[in-house]
Amino acid sequence: MSSKVIKGGTIVTADLSYPADVKIEDGVIVEIGKDLSGDEVLDATGCYVMPGGIDPHTHLEMPFMGTYSTDDFESGTRAGLAGGTTMVVDFCLPNPNQSLLEALQMWDNKTAKASADYSFHMAITWWGEQIFDEMAEVVDRGITSFKHFMAYKGSLMVDDDEMFSSFQRCADLGALPLVHAENGDVVAQMTAKLLAEGNNGPEGHAYSRPPEVEGEATNRAIMIADMAGVPLYVVHVSCEQSHEAIRRARAKGMRVFGEPLIQHLVLDESEYFNPDWDYAARRVMSPPFRNKLHQDSLWSGLASGSLQVVATDHCAFTTEQKRNGIGNFAKIPNGTGGLEDRMPLLWTKGVKTGRLTPNEFVAVTSTNIAKILNCYPKKGAILVGADADIVVWDPKRKKTISAKSQQSIIDYNVFEGFEVEGLPRYVLTRGDVAIVEDKVDAKPGHGQFVAREPKGAVNRALSTWKEITAPRKVQRSGIPATGV
Ligand code: URP
Ligand code: ZN
Ligand code: ZN
Ligand code: ZN
């Protein structure tokens, strides 16, 4: 069996930085220490050796708003690898009334050309006995997180009774519910009003989804999760209102996690006021970009620990697809890319500015989500026995982000022109070298499904607490006669 050694770097994990070599055999880390030798040597001098990034929020080849997102598992995982991300978690989206298992088959069929490992979240888009039953089977197949859209009325949205039923089922199964937290009823009314007033450009999208819409839904989901006795993960937290709800819940001991996106951390609402329609429409996503005060809130949440994960929600549509919404912003397919840029941008805007430490960077790009999704330390760790999903990070390498040189197959990049400092020298996926600086050698078909176990530590603790505090009938003696 041939071996590789990553030599001369500094290992950076979520809790420790130290100089050591890393030896890899058969796709896993077999030794960490000084002066290791192996058949092939990867020089990490001057670099940080970190767990590969995990992006817990992607939509590859996703049917949405009358079209399909253009990056698929081939281009999407390749883009991820080029930026240091070695695992993605995508969303399986059943149509209303469709079986979860049938939808899962459709999503399995998309992944043949994945070049990095992947897992799935399952979306609950309707409710009934069939869904209740199938959720158990989905968990048996290693998918232990269930997404709920509180927005997209008329397509993916579920209401509170459906959400409460599903959250209780998640509690029984030891699964984790996720929410897209925006009040879809309010968004629908505001959208109709804006359009009726002739406010039909991309900026109307931002006006239709103010931070209050997100804050209200986040609070509601948190309370419903608490009543169901289950942890909660809030995807794409974009504003102070939502972050505040999460912060407050966590301070009360509720098990709530929040995920800002790299887009919301670095792009602001002024993007929607660009006079070029295409420019603004390419940046339409939900929730929309916010102003600097909200951005500062998200950065402080990452530094203080009230927000735990940075994702991309990579959902890439071409300019042509975005043009479906000319004359009606509500028809612009919602979504932006970011898989290749998340880690370099977060390093540049976070670590280089001193807002995050290198260890915090590893925590929010990899380790925290591996723990939350219960695939740690197979993923998210530099430890003996862990998968050799590793990024050798050169803090001195620079580039200017440009659609011309990106791996994504769409025709633009929302971060066009951003200068980044901090890029991969090598990226390894289960021991295979997929990236050597600018050279991309992703192998379609290499990616494997990562099955996850239910009943993680937080679920177990919560169910114990809920059992201890469950309603109990008071046993009384001397019950008064009913006097019939
Ligand atoms: O605009 C977005 N975020 N598109 C992808 C679907 C979703 O809401 O996550
Ligand atoms: Zn209902
Ligand atoms: Zn969403
Ligand atoms: Zn999404």
Image: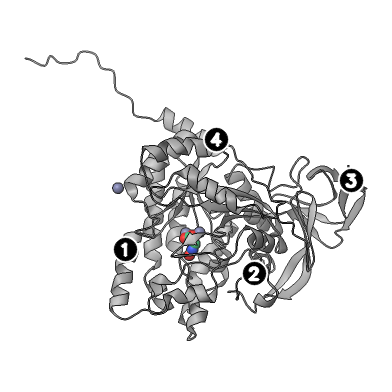
Disc 3, SS: loop
Q: Are marks 2 and 3 in contact (CB under 8 Å)?
A: no
* Mark 1 vs 2, N-terminal side: 1
Q: Name the residue that disc number 2 marks.
A: 349
The residue indicated by pointer 1 is 186
Q: Residues within 10 Å of mark 3 (few under 14, many from 20)?
A: few
**What type is the residue that disc 1 sits on?**
Val
Amino acid at dot 3: Ser
Check disc 2: other Cα within 10 Å, few if <14, some if 14-19, many if 20+: some
Residue 475 appears in the picture as rendered: yes
Q: Nearer the viewer, mark 2 or mark 4?
A: 4
Foreground: disc 2 or disc 3: 3
Label 4's element? Answer: helix
Q: Look at discs 1 and 2 and give the one toward the viewer.
A: 1
Horizontal and vertical percent for residue 295? Answer: 52, 68
Q: Residue 47: horizontal and vertical position, in percent? A: 81, 61
CB atoms at circles 1 and 4 under 8 Å apart?
no
Q: Residues at badges 2 and 4 in contact (C-beta under 8 Å)?
A: no
Mark 1 residue element: helix
Q: Which residue is mark 4?
A: 140
Instruction: Give the percent coordinates (x, y) of residue 315.
Output: 54, 64
